[in-house]
Image (spheres, rainbow, N blue to C red):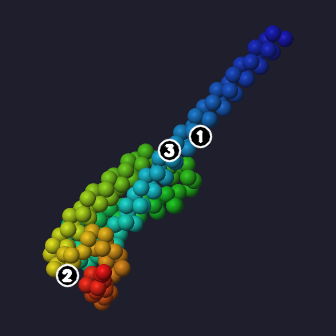
Amino acid sequence: SSRRRHTRSLCDWSSDVCSSDLLHYWCDVVEKAERFVWLFSKAQTLWQYQEVPMTSMLLEEKHPTNFAYFKLLRQKFHHHMEKVASADTLVSAFSNLNDYMRMTDVLLGFKKTDHLLNSVLWSLRTDSPRLFFLTRSDLLSLLFDCHNDLTQLYKYLVSKILCMLFAD
């Protein structure tokens, strides 16, 4: 009887250890998934904000190295998104530390291009007398509204000039 009690308590202890290990494992998986999702979210937000201005024909002509750098980052980001989408399980998608580090590099690259965007917009504004009077937000709006369409660009500029002339 004493021996059975001892054996039963050992079994209970081993099942407690197993369930504890399993709980720690799944907590680790959830934590990694949270970090990965946060990382993807930040990178996606920066990418969406930069996509149109950084792929504008104005940028491609005047700043080819910045344009090429952004295209490379966009390809890396797309590759990581495809890798996650094609994973067998979310656990396997979010558990690879190397993938996490590569995605962190992509996020840092998008942060760098965000700083480049400010200087690129300034140079676009100073290079073109028609764009000089536009604020940063107006210039971004112009690039979003008229992405690589010169007819739209001229319509936008005329409307801005008319608004400025007939304000008040």
- Find out whether the residues at labels 3 and 2 contact each other: C-beta distance under 8 Å: no
Whether residue 128 can be seen here: yes
Q: Give the Cα distance between marks 1 and 3.
A: 10 Å
Residue bearing the label numbered 1: 26
In the depicted structure, whether residue 57 falls above or below residue 74: below
The residue under the point 20% across, 73% down is: 124
CA neighbours of label 3 inside 10 A, class few (<14), some (14 to 19), many (20+): some
Residue bearing the label numbered 3: 32
The residue under the point 30% across, 81% down is: 167
- The disc placed on residue 41 is none
The residue under the point 52% across, 42% down is: 31
The amino acid at mark 2 is Arg
Quarter holding the C terminus is: bottom left
In the depicted structure, whether residue 120 falls above or below residue 5: below
- The disc placed on residue 130 is 2
Residue 148 occupies which quadrant of the picture? bottom left
Q: Give the Cα distance between marks 2 and 1.
A: 58 Å
**Residue 40, image x and y in percent?**
44, 56
